[in-house]
Image (spheres, helix red, strand yellow):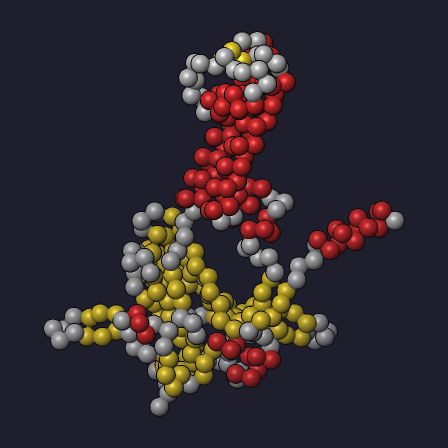
């Protein structure tokens, strides 16, 4: 009976729940910090900063409490500490762990020196680990890239074209930027098996030597396109999703950064076009108005 219960718990833990909301597939627990409870390193990299700092404080206090109790167990083993004074032993532990060494309190027995040695090693290792975790959190490269809230299907050079746009919010350069686009939809095989099939979506320009301001992505819907012959209704019926993956080298930190976005079938607007955000000044210069970055209007 106990073995059957363990198997049921194991099978339950292996289940991954997927929900369809607003035409998008949502994997419960994906990229959530609490999904790394069994992976301490990734857990400490993904928890919010407030929880991370609270963890450091709790770990520090708990360590000193444990060592204070160990010193108390040794009796009168620390010079100038009041007998059975938890506060004296606690602050002696703080001084030892932080390698402060004021000199007023010091170990005077072999037992106390042994605990001090263990605490010194623990403190050195603990500081190194926590410093490494803090640096890893600070040094994680991130991209501040936004995508238009919707994509549109509009004529471009006489061909129906899937269009969306993206912009770099940092005002620096993402060098050798490249964009990969995929179409995912439900299909039924000849054998009657439901599968989620992925198609490559070819853009007119998939690479950019320098992604600094904005980037308009264009995919002509011709006979080689996975969108060819489809309608807005068929996209919804097959739970179609357009997934975009953008990567490049951030010139500021000289590291690869990534950005990802997806459009559900409901986010693809037919016979619309984006409001133009490029404008000319009276003296012939150009400027970009990001206020209308997400705005679309119907075709005339």
| Residue 99, picture quadrant | top left
At a point 29% along the width and 58% down the height, the residue shown is: 171
- In percent of width and height, residue 226 lies at 52, 76
For the residue pair 99 and 251, the one nearer the viewer reads as 99
At a point 32% along the width and 79% down the height, the residue shown is: 275
For the residue pair 117 and 209, the one nearer the viewer reads as 117
Indicate left or right for 5 with 105 as reference. right
For the residue pair 157 and 124, the one nearer the viewer reads as 124
Indicate left or right for 83 with 159 as reference. right
- In percent of width and height, residue 160 lies at 42, 83
Residue 97 in sight in this render: no
- In percent of width and height, residue 268 lies at 47, 78
- In percent of width and height, residue 178 lies at 40, 60
Whether residue 88 is situated above or below residue 1 in the rendered picture: above
Whether residue 2 is situated above or below residue 65 in the rendered picture: below
Whether residue 229 is situated above or below residue 262 in the rendered picture: below
């Amino acid at each position: 009976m106990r073995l059957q219960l363990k198997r049921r718990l194991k099978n339950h833990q292996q289940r991954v729940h997927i929900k369809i909301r607003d035409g998008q597939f949502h994997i419960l627990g994906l990229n959530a910090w609490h999904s790394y409870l069994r992976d301490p390193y990734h857990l400490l990299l993904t928890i919010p900063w407030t929880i991370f700092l609270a963890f450091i404080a709790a770990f520090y206090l708990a360590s000193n409490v444990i060592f204070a109790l160990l010193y108390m167990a040794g009796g009168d083993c620390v010079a100038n500490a009041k007998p059975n004074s938890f506060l004296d032993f606690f602050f002696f532990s703080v001084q030892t762990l932080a390698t402060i060494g004021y000199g007023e309190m010091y170990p005077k027995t072999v037992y106390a020196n042994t605990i001090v040695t263990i605490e010194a090693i623990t403190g050195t290792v603990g500081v190194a680990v926590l410093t490494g975790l803090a640096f890893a959190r600070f040094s994680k490269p991130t991209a501040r890239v936004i995508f238009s809230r919707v994509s549109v299907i509009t004529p471009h050079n006489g061909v129906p074209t899937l269009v969306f746009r993206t912009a770099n919010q940092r005002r620096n350069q993402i060098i050798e930027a490249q964009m990969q686009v995929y179409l995912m939809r439900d299909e039924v095989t000849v054998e009657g098996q439901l599968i989620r099939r992925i198609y490559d979506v070819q853009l007119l320009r998939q690479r950019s030597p320098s992604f600094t301001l904005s980037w308009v992505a264009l995919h002509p819907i011709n006979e080689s396109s996975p969108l060819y012959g489809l309608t807005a209704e068929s996209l919804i019926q097959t739970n179609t999703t357009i997934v975009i993956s953008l990567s490049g080298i951030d010139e500021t930190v000289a590291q690869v950064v990534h950005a990802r976005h997806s459009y559900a079938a409901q986010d693809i607007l037919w016979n619309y076009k984006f409001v133009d955000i490029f404008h000319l000044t009276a003296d012939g210069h150009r400027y970009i108005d990001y206020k209308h970055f997400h705005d679309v209007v119907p075709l005339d």
